Amino acid sequence: MTQIELKRAYIDPAPSDGFRILVDRLWPRGMTKEKLEIDFWAKALAPSSELRKAWHHDPARFSEFSTLYSDELNQNPAVDEFLELLAQHPRVTFVYGAKNETANHAMVLREYLLAQLGS
């Protein structure tokens, strides 16, 4: 069973992170490949630019965003291939750039994928 952790891109990588996956469509500002130490960039699973801009990281609209993002994921052909990748790694860390650690797309993605994996 895959364990999925979340970590801001601006927090130093740790060996306990396991397989590190950037889950943003855009590269985090000011970060180099060396500093980020990601193993995979899941651009295709990030929220669409339209949804990201419409939400604008407004915590009051997080519930609405979560529903719309889940709908996008339901239509996203990259999800099945990504689930296969996750199955190969017992510990995965989703790396994201958002400032809000309690309302962000990485949380929605984790819950969505764990439901798909049957966890």
Image: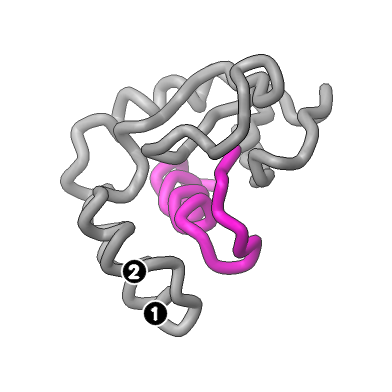
Three-letter code, disc 2: Trp
Quarter of the picture holding the N terminus: top right
Residue at 45 percent across and 67 percent down: it is: 57
Left or right: residue 95 compared with residue 47: right
Task: State the image coordinates of residue 65 (x, y, percent, origin top left).
Answer: 34, 69
| Element marked by disc 1 | helix
| Residue 1 shows in the view | no
Residue at 60 percent across and 18 percent down: it is: 33
Task: State the image coordinates of residue 16 (x, y, percent, origin top left).
Answer: 82, 28
Is 117 covered by the magenta stretch? Answer: yes
Span colored in magenta:
95-119
| Element marked by disc 2 | helix
Three-letter code, disc 1: Arg
How dense is the environment of label 1, judged by Cα within 10 Å: few (below 14), some, or many (20 and up)? few
Q: Are marks 2 and 1 in contact (CB under 8 Å)?
A: yes
- Extreme residue in the bottom direction: 60
Is 66 covered by the magenta stretch? Answer: no
| Residue 84 shows in the view | yes
Give whichever of discs 2 and 1 has the lower sequence position.
2
Residue at 49 percent across and 77 percent down: it is: 59
Quarter-of-image position of residue 101: bottom right
Quarter-of-image position of residue 34: top right
Residue receiving disc 1: 61
Left or right: residue 69 compared with residue 8: left
Task: State the image coordinates of residue 116 (x, y, percent, origin top left).
Answer: 39, 45
Q: Nearer the viewer, residue 44 or 56?
A: 56
Residue receiving disc 2: 55
